[in-house]
């Protein structure tokens, strides 16, 4: 149970943080609709474009998008049809499996992604108002929240450091950069943790859990 704040009735710190995250989500949604109105894109269509841009080096199928964005296959299918009609996305046969269709951005789609990045500017401005230490703490907290959502089955596998086979928490004694990324063989600080890494490789369940426990405990007992 969350710690109670003085003079806040029955609301806990958890209640206030949850309310705050809800407001941030509402702000993002609002900005997406405002930007989408001008370019005739919905927030869902913008999300799909951004997802494809982030996975440009890999074949992406409709079910991949549905799973990653927590959307139904029908919702993604309708959005993709519109994006294809707008010539922002193209469908083609997979080189590995000619029976499967994969989705890629067109040149116009890549340009559109640059426009949709403006949707997050208002939230980015708020994050920039935090000090570097506050940003690192916030990022660590978000990592834990996303891990919980993943464990509950609310979202699909998050491509974040904490679940990656390359991530080695608290390997180094340097408090500024205690973690290690095996892919690039370099130390990492709390502020360098990624929540959506294109190089993510899921680790074995037992090992991921062990590393997660080390991460949560702050390196104690490793």
Image (spheres, grey):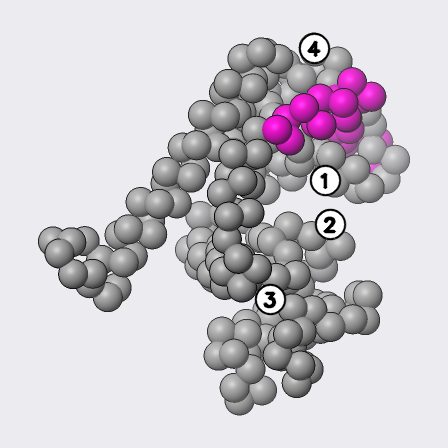
Viewport quadrant of the C terminus: bottom right
Give the labeled residue for mark 1: 54
Whole-percent x, y for residue 29 in the image: 46, 29
* Residues in magenta, as a range: 97-118
Which of marks 3 and 4 precedes in the sequence? Answer: 4
| Residue 198 disc label | 2
**In which quadrant of the rendered image does the N terminus lie?**
bottom left
Earlier in the chain: of badge 3 and badge 2, it is: 3
Dot 2: element? loop
The mark that comes first in sequence, 1 or 2, is 1
Viewer-nearest residue: 209 or 175: 175
In the image, what residue occupies the spot 51% across and 18% down? Answer: 34
Give the residue number, with chain letter if any, for mark 3: 190
Work out whether mark 1 precedes mark 4 in sequence or the reverse, and give the earlier one.
Answer: 1
List the residue tagged with mark 4: 85
Which SS class for mark 3?
helix
Q: Quadrant of residue 214?
A: bottom right
- Answer left or right for 91 relative to 66: right
């Amino acid at each position: 149970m969350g710690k109670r704040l003085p003079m806040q009735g029955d609301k806990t710190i958890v209640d206030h943080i949850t309310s705050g995250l809800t407001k941030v989500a509402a702000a993002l949604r609002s900005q997406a609709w405002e930007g989408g109105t001008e370019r005739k894109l919905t927030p869902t269509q913008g999300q799909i474009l951004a997802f494809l841009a982030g996975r440009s080096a890999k074949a992406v199928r409709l079910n991949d998008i549905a799973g990653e964005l927590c959307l139904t296959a029908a919702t993604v299918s309708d959005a993709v049809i519109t994006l294809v009609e707008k010539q922002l996305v193209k469908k083609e046969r997979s080189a590995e499996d000619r029976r499967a269709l994969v989705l890629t951005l067109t040149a116009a789609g890549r340009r559109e992604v640059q426009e949709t990045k403006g949707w997050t500017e208002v939230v980015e401005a708020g994050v920039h108002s935090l000090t570097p230490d506050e940003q690192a703490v916030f990022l660590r907290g978000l990592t834990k929240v996303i891990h919980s959502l993943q464990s509950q089955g609310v979202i699909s596998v998050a491509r974040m450091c904490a679940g990656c086979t390359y991530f080695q928490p608290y390997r180094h004694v340097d408090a500024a950069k205690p973690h290690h990324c095996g892919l690039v063989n370099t130390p990492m600080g709390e502020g360098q943790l990624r929540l959506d890494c294109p190089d993510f490789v899921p680790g074995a369940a037992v090992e991921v859990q062990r590393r997660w426990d080390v991460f949560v405990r702050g390196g104690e007992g490793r």
